[in-house]
């Protein structure tokens, strides 16, 4: 088994979460922030600037002219989209890895993250959740722990898979049995080190834990969105669908089968679109 | 792409490909609760792969945005019709069904895999279509490939398991 110290050492090797992203998210909480002020912060981050301009001019927005000025781009895509682009741009690099332990195809973890964040947004709309930005971030980062555990999983993959296949043991239980830690706990640890807000850390930590009374909307919606993404096939290959379903949370929010069907049907187009824009190349 | 050697077609979620290109390989990745439905006529050498997500369409079917490949009730007839157009005959057609996995929950909220399979069986029964092989259920994620040169269909699970149907 691996030790917590070893894992934390691994987290230290991860490149830090970009300051530009956290700073802009903070700025956007103030409704008086202007596009100029945002552009002034973003312009120092080459990767994010490029990403914003690229997305602005992509088929996702279907513009007829080309936008080459960052300020104009910020105005055009709007605050809501800007937040998403910032977070996605800041996160993508962590997922762009070869031969990961959880994936059977390169890019699966990333597409799963995007899918869960879109589905969570749609559930959030239907039950009118308060903080949609935090929901988006929590959903996008919920499996960040898998990136840290990745190489250990690759080593222990056969052992874990056997346990899952030989019975109805959840992947999470098998992961804990073999590695001594699960990816939700590690994910929370990563976000703690990156100094993320407590609500987001908690949603990541609990995303496979049984529902408890007084769990927040954020914690609950990430769990359901993760369930739905798995069913839609946006899971991560190795662990598949071997996780518990949160029917108690569905009951709590009065999400019936047809509502869930509709959320999936409505989310699909958006997932496909964003998947094409942010595709990490997959192999045939 | 259809004329090149070893042409591969990736079929996404709610997507379909029907071809008579003998060099083609059709693949759909990670079916969760979705179904991958394969048809192949060994005489006409026509084959197709459909990746549906839900049992039946509740949205407006006449809308220009409507995607029939999302649902069993609209996708499966489209798959057969497209195969017929290329010369496939129903009585010769080999049909394989894969996917329909479930997350671990008995409440019925998440039984889309089972509902997809039930809807497909009902539709096939009504239309006198026999399923040759199926690989469905459980909690695994499946990747399905159809090789057009001989109609061989494989299901891959996890990193190394490959099952020939």
Image: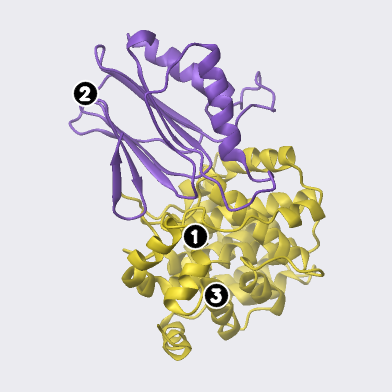
Chain colours: A yellow, B purple
- Are labels 3 and 2 on one chain? no
Between A178 and A13, the one lying in front of the other is A178
Q: Which residue is label 1 attached to?
A: A51
* SS of the residue under disc 2: loop
Q: Which residue is mark 2?
A: B22
Residue neighbourhood size for the residue with mark 3, other residues' Cα within 10 Å, grouped as few (<14), some (14–19), many (≥20)? many
Q: Earlier in the sequence, mark 3 or mark 1?
A: 1
The front one of B153 and A30 is B153
Q: From the viewer's perspective, is the residue at label 2 or at label 1 nearer?
A: 2
- Please tell me whether mark 3 sits on a helix, a strand or a loop: helix
Farthest residue in the bottom direction? Answer: A5
Q: Within 10 Å of the Cα at label 1, are there few (<14), some (14-19), or many (20+) other Cα atoms?
A: some
Q: Secondary structure at mark 1?
A: helix
Q: Position of residue A72 (x, y in %)?
A: 62, 57
Quadrant occupied by the N terminus of chain B: top left
Are the residues under marks 3 and 1 on the same chain? Answer: yes
Q: Is residue A128 above or below residue A4?
A: above
Q: Would residue B158 appear left or right of B63 to someone viewing this image?
A: left
Question: Chain ID for label 2?
Answer: B
Do residues under tags 3 and 1 come within 8 Å of each other at their CB atoms? no
**Mark 3 sits on what residue?**
A187
Residue at (65%, 76%) from the top-left corner? Answer: A201
Name the chain under label 3.
A
Residue B27: image location, x then y, percent: 34, 37
A217 horizontally vs A69: left or right? right
Q: CA distance from mark 3 to mark 1?
A: 25 Å
Identify which residue is drawn at 65% across, 61% down: A136
What residue occupies the far front of the structure in this picture?
A167
């Amino acid at each position: 088994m691996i030790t917590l110290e070893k894992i934390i050492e691994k987290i230290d090797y991860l490149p830090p979460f970009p300051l530009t992203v956290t700073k802009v998210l903070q700025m956007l909480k103030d409704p008086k922030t202007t596009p100029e002020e945002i552009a002034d912060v973003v312009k120092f981050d080459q990767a994010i600037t490029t990403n914003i301009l690229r997305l602005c001019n992509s088929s996702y927005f279907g513009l007829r002219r080309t936008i080459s000025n960052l300020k104009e781009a910020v105005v055009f895509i709007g605050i809501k989209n800007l937040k998403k682009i910032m977070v996605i741009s800041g996160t993508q690099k962590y997922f762009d890895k070869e031969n990961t332990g959880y994936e059977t195809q390169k890019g699966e973890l990333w597409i799963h993250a995007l899918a869960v964040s879109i589905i969570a947004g749609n559930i959030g709309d239907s039950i009118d959740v308060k903080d949609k930005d935090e929901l988006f971030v929590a959903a996008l980062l919920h499996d960040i722990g898998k990136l840290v555990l990745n190489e250990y999983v690759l080593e222990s993959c056969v052992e874990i898979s056997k346990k899952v296949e030989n019975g109805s043991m959840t992947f999470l239980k098998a992961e804990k049995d073999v590695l001594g830690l699960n990816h939700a706990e590690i994910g929370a640890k990563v976000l703690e080190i990156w100094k993320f807000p407590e609500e987001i850390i908690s949603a990541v930590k609990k995303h496979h834990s049984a529902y408890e009374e007084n769990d927040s909307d954020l914690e609950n919606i990430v769990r359901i969105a993760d369930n739905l993404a798995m069913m839609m096939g946006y899971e991560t290959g190795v662990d598949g669908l071997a996780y518990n379903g949160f029917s108690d949370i569905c009951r709590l929010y009065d999400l019936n089968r047809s509502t869930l069907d509709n959320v999936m049907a409505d989310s699909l187009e958006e997932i496909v679109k964003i998947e094409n824009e942010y595709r990490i190349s997959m192999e045939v | 792409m259809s004329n090149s050697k070893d042409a591969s077609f990736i079929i996404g979620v709610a997507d379909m490909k029907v071809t008579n290109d003998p060099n083609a390989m059709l693949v759909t990745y990670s079916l969760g609760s979705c179904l991958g439905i394969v048809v192949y006529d060994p005489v006409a050498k026509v084959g197709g792969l459909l990746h549906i997500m839900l049992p039946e369409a509740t949205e407006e079917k006449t809308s220009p945005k409507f995607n029939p490949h999302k649902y069993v009730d609209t996708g499966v007839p489209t798959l057969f019709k497209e195969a017929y157009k290329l010369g496939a005959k129903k009585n010769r057609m080999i049909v394989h069904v894969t996917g329909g996995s479930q997350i671990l929950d008995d409440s019925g909220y998440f039984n889309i895999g089972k509902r997809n399979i039930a809807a497909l069986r009902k539709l096939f029964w009504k239309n006198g279509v026999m399923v040759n092989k199926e690989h469905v259920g459980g909690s695994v994620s499946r990747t399905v490939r159809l090789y057009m040169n001989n109609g061989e269909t494989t299901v891959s699970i996890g990193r190394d398991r490959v099952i020939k149907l």
